[in-house]
Image (spheres, grey):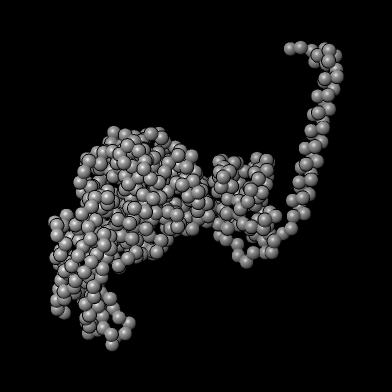
């Protein structure tokens, strides 16, 4: 080692300059820290807020200290979110200024920065003592979000309560109207699956990229298979568990753990990762009933980058909105069984886009196994695959994902209350109609459903309705509909039905004297007036039992 004094003597001027620079920087650093501390202390405080939110129960220790002021100049709130990892918490800041200021405050090292999403001004933090985090956020307006996104698997009880359900098994493709070779469907389309991760399988040759927001277990065969099953409904080439668009490229983004749960940070990070991977479609078969601003901003980011998100509507058996499915830019998918009936566990609401198969579907599972799954988490990837198939001509992409989604919805089959409704959305996915939409002269008339319409005015009477739809590409002329009920028979004439159009006919009845839940058997038959053979004659007749409500 050279003698320090000798080195200094050889070039004393240069070393004196170095010492000056070090001292100058130290003084400047002290001055900046002192000035920043004074400026923070002088920032105006906002008015006291009316209520202090309770911290997320799963990850935030109690009690949360009272909050009555706001240190940031923007006078807005900081979001605090439950974490799926113990002793961690997620924060989201309203502005770049507040985000940068908070990152600066972490310099003391008492709170550990685990991860950060600069584009969303969000951080994942670890802590040893809750008081350290509490002190760091003392003086901030806080809004807490305590739910965790999870795979919306319906409970066995919810499934068993609905009698007469018909499963799909391995017959998904023919039920969707796919009668041709679909092996090249989806070519050129890249789809991200945000779930528990896709485990490589010979049935999934399209798996090219894997991103681990949440790490896989060491033994991949022990991975929660939900993500692999979801991916197989999109792009499996296994005849025993076929997918809709086998030629699509898959991007696995593991955001859920072995219990199927994620958190808002993981889901938001997964959406950003999907955009960065250059996908056109993101499938999310999980959600939360809590409107989450961190997830919402990630969804908006994807939309701004022309990435379409398809999400499960949820399986909580009610009208609860599930996010991200309920956001306006997202295609929200509900579930039906193989008889076309709405599944009771499938969430409904005005936000619903359409419905698709969601009961007892055969899928691929890790370890070269198969599994039968049910739920809207199965319905969403089927729609994702249908959109991918519509985008591609078998060799490359011919349209955007949003345009393809419009077409898929336009050619869905009418169901439920005439027109878009809260149980079926615009209708039930029919991929056969989508793929044959440009073939002229297809004749396909269908009776879609019957319903009882109770009148609020007893003097005006009630109605039994029958609805028909033209599901072909030829105009239907003079279609005769005959409806039989316990109250008599009525014939109707649909003089002209354009392709895709529906028409509803009503038979006046009086139900006032019947007890509630009285069964009424209704059957209808239609007869074509348009020349040609109906390609699906089985839906020219329909019988069902309606109940007085």
Picture quadrant of residue 491: bottom left
> Seen from this angle, which residue lies furthest bottom?
459
Rendered residue at 38%/60% (across/down): 352
Image quarter hosting the N terminus? top right
Residue 340 % position (x, y): 24, 59
Residue 38 % position (x, y): 78, 49
Picture quadrant of residue 453: bottom left
State the residue in front, 456 or 493: 493
Rendered residue at 64%/57% (across/down): 76
Rendered residue at 82%/25% (across/down): 19
State the residue in front, 441 or 16: 441
Rendered residue at 70%/55% (across/down): 73
Please indicate whether residue 440 sits to the left or right of residue 253 in the image. Answer: left
Relative vertical location of residue 313 with respect to residue 466 in this rendering, above or below: above
Q: Residue 221, can we see it?
A: no
State the residue in front, 287 or 448: 448
Please indicate whether residue 173 sits to the left or right of residue 56 in the image. Answer: left
Image quarter hosting the C terminus? bottom left
Residue 483 % position (x, y): 16, 72
Picture quadrant of residue 183: top left
Relative vertical location of residue 514 with respect to residue 415 in this rendering, above or below: below
Residue 177 % position (x, y): 22, 50
């Amino acid at each position: 080692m050279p003698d320090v004094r000798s080195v200094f003597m050889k070039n004393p001027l240069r070393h004196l300059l170095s010492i000056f620079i070090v001292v100058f920087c130290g003084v400047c650093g002290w001055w900046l820290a002192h000035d920043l501390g004074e400026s923070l202390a002088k920032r105006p405080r906002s008015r006291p807020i009316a209520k202090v939110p309770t911290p997320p129960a799963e990850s935030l220790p109690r009690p949360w200290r009272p909050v009555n002021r706001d240190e940031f100049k923007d006078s807005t709130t900081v979001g605090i979110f439950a974490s799926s990892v113990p002793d961690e918490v997620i924060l989201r800041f309203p502005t770049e200024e507040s985000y940068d200021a908070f990152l600066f405050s972490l310099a003391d090292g008492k709170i550990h920065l685990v991860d950060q999403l600069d584009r969303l001004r969000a951080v994942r933090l670890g802590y040893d003592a809750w008081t350290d985090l509490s002190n760091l956020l003392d003086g901030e307006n806080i809004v807490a979000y305590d739910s965790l996104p999870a795979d919306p698997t319906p409970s066995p009880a919810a499934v068993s309560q609905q009698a007469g359900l018909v499963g799909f098994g391995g017959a998904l493709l023919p039920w969707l109207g796919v009668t041709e070779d679909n092996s090249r469907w989806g070519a050129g389309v890249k789809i991200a699956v945000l779930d528990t991760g896709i485990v490589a399988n010979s049935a999934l040759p399209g798996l090219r990229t894997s991103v681990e927001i949440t790490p896989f277990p060491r033994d991949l065969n022990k991975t929660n298979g939900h993500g692999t099953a979801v991916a197989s409904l999109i792009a499996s080439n296994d005849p025993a568990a076929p997918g809709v668009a086998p030629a699509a490229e898959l991007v696995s983004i593991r955001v859920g753990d072995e219990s199927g749960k994620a958190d808002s940070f993981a889901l938001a990070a997964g959406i950003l990762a999907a955009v960065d991977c250059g996908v056109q479609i993101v499938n999310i078969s999980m959600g939360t009933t809590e409107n989450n601003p961190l997830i919402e901003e990630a969804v908006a980011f994807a939309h701004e980058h022309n990435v379409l998100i398809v999400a499960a509507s949820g399986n909580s058996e009610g009208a609860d909105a599930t996010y991200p499915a309920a956001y306006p830019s997202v295609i929200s998918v509900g579930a039906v069984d193989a008889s076309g009936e709405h599944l009771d566990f499938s969430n409904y609401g005005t936000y619903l886009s359409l419905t698709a198969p969601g009961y007892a579907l055969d899928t691929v599972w890790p370890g070269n196994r198969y599994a039968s799954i049910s739920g809207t988490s199965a319905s969403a990837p089927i729609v994702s695959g249908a959109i991918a198939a519509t985008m591609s001509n078998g060799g490359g992409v011919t349209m955007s994902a949003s345009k393809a989604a419009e077409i898929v919805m336009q050619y869905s089959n009418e169901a439920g209350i005439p027109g878009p409704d809260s149980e079926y959305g615009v209708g039930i996915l029919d991929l056969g109609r989508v793929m044959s939409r440009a073939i002229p002269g297809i004749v396909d008339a269908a009776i879609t459903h019957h319903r009882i319409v109770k009148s609020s005015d007893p003097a005006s009477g009630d109605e039994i309705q029958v609805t028909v739809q033209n599901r072909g590409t030829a105009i239907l002329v003079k279609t005769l509909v005959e409806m039989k009920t316990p109250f008599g028979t009525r014939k109707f004439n649909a003089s002209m039905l354009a392709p895709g159009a529906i028409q509803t006919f009503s038979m006046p009845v009086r139900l006032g004297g019947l007890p509630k839940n009285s069964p009424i058997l209704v059957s209808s038959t239609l007869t074509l007036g348009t020349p040609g053979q109906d390609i699906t004659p089985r839906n020219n007749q329909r019988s069902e039992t309606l109940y007085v409500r």
